[in-house]
Structure formats: C-alpha cells, structure tokens
Image (spheres, rainbow, N blue to C red):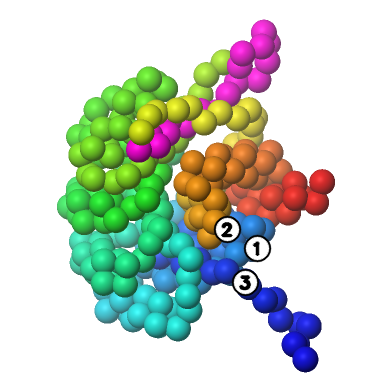
Amino acid sequence: MADERTVPGMKAALTIAGSDSSGGAGIQADIKTWAAMGVFGCTVITAVTAQNTRGVMKIEHLSADLVEAQIEAVVGDINCQAYKTGMIGTVELAQTIAAAVKRHQLRPLVVDPVMMTKSGAKLVDEAVARTVAERLFKYAAIVTPNRLEAARLLGGQSCNTIAEGMSAAKQIAKRYGCHAVVVTGFERPGPAVDGPPEAVDAFWTGEETVELTAEKRPSTNTHGAGCTFSAAIVGGLVQGKPLNDAVEQAKSLVSEAIRQNINIGQGAGPVNHLAWLNVKKK
C-alpha cells in the first residue's frame, strides 16, 4: 500500500544562485516561488550575502570547487526538469558553471544575468559579465536581463524605452547565441484616461518581438521581482508549458507577487513569492 504522506510525481528544479539573508531575492526567492507553483526546489549556492531591505552590506563568493561539488551532488541524485542561474560573481565560477551545464546537459536553462541592480549599481565586474554572457548564454532557453543589464550587455547602448528594449532583446540573442530574451523593467501610461500605467517587458521569442504587459503596481516593495520572474519561468517549464506560455504566466505571477507585496523592514520590502497560492485558490 502506498504511503499517503508522499507526493507522487513531484517535479524538481535547480537554482544556481546567491543567498539573500533577508529572504527576498536569490535562492530564497526561487525556492519560495517554486513552492507556490508545486515544484520542489534544489539549490546550489554561489555566494552568501549580508543584506536587508535597505541594501547589500557584504558579499562572499564561494569557491568554484564547492559550487561544482554542489552541482555534482544534486544532479547525480535528483532528476530536475529545469534549471536556472542567478548571481555568478567570479570568472572562475562562470567557467565552472558553464562547463557543468554543458557536461550534464542541464536543460532547459533560464539565465538571469544578475549584473546590475535596478538603481544602476554594478554587482560584477566587466570580466565576469563578459564570461557569463559568452560562456553561459548559448546554453539558455531564455535570458532575462533588466533594462540596465541589457544596456551593459550591448556595450552601454541606450535601453530606456520600450522600442529600445525590443531591439535590445533581439540583439542580445543574436550576439550571444541564446534562443530567447526578455528585457524587463519598462513603463508606459495606461490605455485608459487617468488609468494606471503599464509595466512592460520586451520579449524576443526566437521568432518575433512581443510586449508583455501588466498593470504597474504602485509599490516600492519590489525586492526580488527579477529573481521571482526567472524562477517562475522555470516553474512553468517544469510543468511542461511551452516557453512562450511559461513566460506569460511568469509575468502574471510577478505582477500578483508585487500586488500582494510584503511590507517588512525599513527599506524596499520583498514581493510576495507565495501570492500565486492565493490566485490558484480562486
């Protein structure tokens, strides 16, 4: 007789990313998002950060040997259906992770190039950014830079308007050999008079550029939105959705996570990674 306490058919995903001590971004955002989507989350930690809602105080990158050992431990035992990468802070880590992705055929892969904060602060140096883009992007089903990261990936090219974002998404895909790209973080006035503005992302599907739109939520509690978006794409892929459908669902999930944001701390609070549970219950 089967044990009724078990969950048959549970699917898993793996995140290779940094740890956020405040719980809003990084691996914490990934596994919370996946839990809300019914996906079991495995983690490979690349960095430990000391941060809270007011900012990042310290980052310590783990050794390439330890990161590689974590990858080997997980993939040697657990069958994950999709993968993502987040913060990769050294050239050696980028090379090691790319080699492991190739060796173990970690597909489908979502690459969130954590290079710039929304405020414009650089999280990695130029050598790391270049290595991640050149060594890892080519294995990705989709890459999800914010607009500042997209500009950096294209050598400082302007990426402030939706039109520039649409062009940048296609250019990044062509330059680095990735299948699809979503450039996030644009805004425009709503279609209705005095209506709310729209949050817009520029999506190169591999065949065409399309806009992903949702109501712009009037909140500063958006910490972890980018990590949650890329994790939600992975969650959709784990569930067997085509890439375009997984991306559209992720846009809706993040919009709801911001709407149900969590007001904790003295700075910019996190999105509500578990908000999807409330939507699914309706």
Please, what is the three-letter code of the amino acid marked with disc 1? Gly
* Residues marked 2 and 1 touching at CB (< 8 Å): yes
Report the magenta residues as a range: 190-206
Magenta region includes residue 200:
yes
Task: Please give the name of the residue rendered at 49% of the width and 41% of the height, measured from the top-left corner.
Answer: 244
Amino acid, disc 2: Gln
Q: Amino acid at mark 3?
A: Met
Which residue lies at the image location 56% right of the left edge and 64% below the top edge?
A: 31
Looking at the image, residue 183 sits to the left or right of residue 216; the answer is left
Badge 1, how many Cα within 10 Å: few under 14, some, many 20+?
some
Q: Looking at the image, which is closer to me, 54 or 185?
A: 185
Residue at which label 2 appears:
239
- Cβ atoms under marks 1 and 3 closer than 8 Å: yes
Residue 228 shows in the view: no
Whichever of callouts 1 and 3 sits on the residue coming sooner in the sequence is 3
Between residue 205 and residue 13, name the one nearer to us.
Answer: 205
Position above or below: 182 against 160? below
User: In front here: 96 or 246?
Assistant: 246
Instruction: Determine if the magenta segment contains residue 52.
Output: no
Q: Is residue 53 above or below residue 77?
A: above
Outermost residue toward the right in this view = 282
Residue 189, x across and y down, in percent: 57, 15
Residue indicated by mark 3 = 10
Q: Please tell me whether mark 2 sits on a helix, a strand or a loop.
A: loop
Q: Quadrant of residue 17?
A: bottom left
